Image (spheres, rainbow, N blue to C red):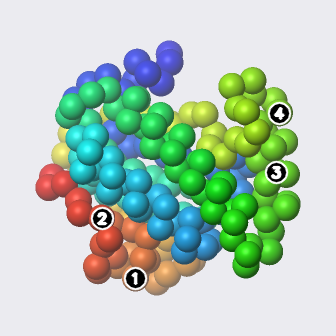
Amino acid sequence: MSELRKTTTDHPYFLTFTVVGWLDVFTRREYCDIVIKNLQYCKDNKGMELYAFVIMPSHIHLIVRQNESRLSEVVRDFKSITAKEIIKEIITNNVESRKDWILNFFKAYASDIKQNKEYMFWQKTNHPVELFSAKVMEQKINYIHNNPVEAGIVDSPEYYVYSSAYIKPKVELSPI
């Protein structure tokens, strides 16, 4: 079944956006800030409700709901814009020691997919999981917030800056 059909209800969804090859891109603040800025834009301008998120080194987990248009369209636009902005930042970032290697990596992935012009940043699938009950929603929020703890990045979820569990989140969350 296509992912477009999987995100057609008005329930919240747990989504995962993964960088091609699970490449650790979100190790630099500049790239994480691009994701944060675009999440906020989708909330402010596209009617996306954001309940929880975490930006891990190679992937992002979100719980979102769309109330104005199809979630698949917002996700498509978010992934497209963030990919372009992050690649542009990699190209212009003078302190990115892995610049040539990263860009060649993204070019290699793009060469296998006709719709990609030069670079491919995100894997195609989002692994949508419909959150049909409060219990499932709570389980996924706990999973998201504990992801950096399980990865050994921080000792407690509220210390991870790029998560909705952070003490001072940079993105306003929708109430549950």
Residue 123 x/y as whole percent: 63, 40
Residue 82 x/y as whole percent: 52, 50
> Gap between marks 4 and 1, in whole Å?
39 Å
Residue that carries the numbered disc 3 in the rendered image: 105
Residue that carries the numbered disc 2 in the rendered image: 171
Callout 3 amino acid: Phe
Dot 3 falls on a residue whose secondary structure is helix
* Left or right of 60 in this view: 7: left
User: In the image, what residue occupies the spot 78% across and 58% down?
Assistant: 102
Decide which of tag 3 and tag 4 comes sooner along the chain: 3
Q: Hey, which residue is sitting farthest front in the picture?
A: 92
Residue 29 lies in quadrant: bottom right
Callout 4 amino acid: Ser
Decide which of tag 4 and tag 1 comes sooner along the chain: 4
Residue that carries the numbered disc 4 in the rendered image: 111
> Gap between marks 1 and 3, in whole Å?
31 Å
* Left or right of 34 in this view: 131: left
Residue 160 x/y as whole percent: 43, 77
Q: Tag 1: Cα neighbours inside 10 Å, few (<14), some, or many (≥20)?
A: some
Residue 141 in sight here: no
Residue that carries the numbered disc 1 in the rendered image: 159
Dot 1 falls on a residue whose secondary structure is helix
Callout 1 amino acid: Tyr
Q: Are marks 1 and 2 in contact (CB under 8 Å)?
A: no
Q: Are marks 3 and 4 in contact (CB under 8 Å)?
A: no
Decide which of tag 1 and tag 3 comes sooner along the chain: 3
